[in-house]
Amino acid sequence: MLIKIAFDERKAGFRDDQPRGPEGRWIIGGGKYVVSERHTTGNKQIDSITEKITDTLDVVLSQIGPVSGSLYGTYVHSSAAKLLREMNIPGIGKDGIEQSFSLGDLVRYGLSDSIRTDALLRNDQTGEILAVWNIKTGSQRLSPKRVAKIRSYLNISDDVPVIDIHINLGIIVKNYDV
């Protein structure tokens, strides 16, 4: 029974140090990006941008007050997007943040049956997509099914890294061999 409880707590992401509100529910507030796992692509430009995104998450997380539920994810994403746009990273710029896609084409933000990327790097000359970043704030990572959907909707091949940045679980590069 103790093993089952320990497993369930680990599975649920239980952390003794996570603050609780007056009702006993977890509240999210302040903190720092946690690196428990970090994969790199081997591409200096892409890995450098991943570092900039994680540094930006550090700033966002250090400024967040007590927030819970979906408001937490919304706050992290919108705040990170604002800071990343201000950075105007070459190949991403202001437009490569929080874009929506469907069937290989850029579409109106939030269009039904579209997917949204958190950051997208393009070749400045050709417009070819070189990497995709997805920030995760909940309990799940990007599933293989979701990565396949991202690839399909963006019309990109398996050699374009889809980088899953989870604020508690670290970074995983989703390529054909991951």
Image (cartoon, rainbow, N blue to C red):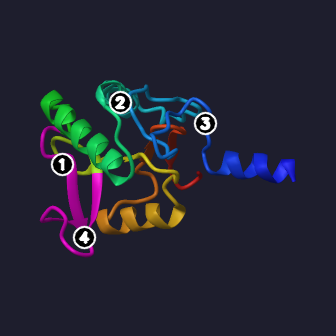
Depth check: give the residue in front, 2 or 139: 2
Q: Quadrant of residue 61?
A: top left
Q: Residues within 10 Å of mark 2 (few under 14, many from 20)?
A: many
Depth check: give the residue in front, 72 or 137: 72
Earlier-in-chain disc, 1 versus 4: 4
Q: Residue at x 17, y 41 (%)?
A: 124
Amino acid type at mark 4: Ser
Q: Which residue is mark 1?
A: 126
Q: Which residue is mark 2?
A: 61
Q: CA distance from mark 2 to mark 3?
A: 17 Å
Q: Which mark is residue 15?
A: 3
Kindly tell me whether residue 109 is visible in this rendering.
Answer: yes
Q: Residue at x 48, y 37 (%)?
A: 41
Amino acid type at mark 3: Arg
Residue found at the far front of this picture = 22
Q: Which residues are magenta?
A: 93-117
Q: Position of residue 99 (x, y in %)?
A: 20, 55
Mark in the foreground, 4 or 3 = 3
Earlier-in-chain disc, 4 versus 3: 3
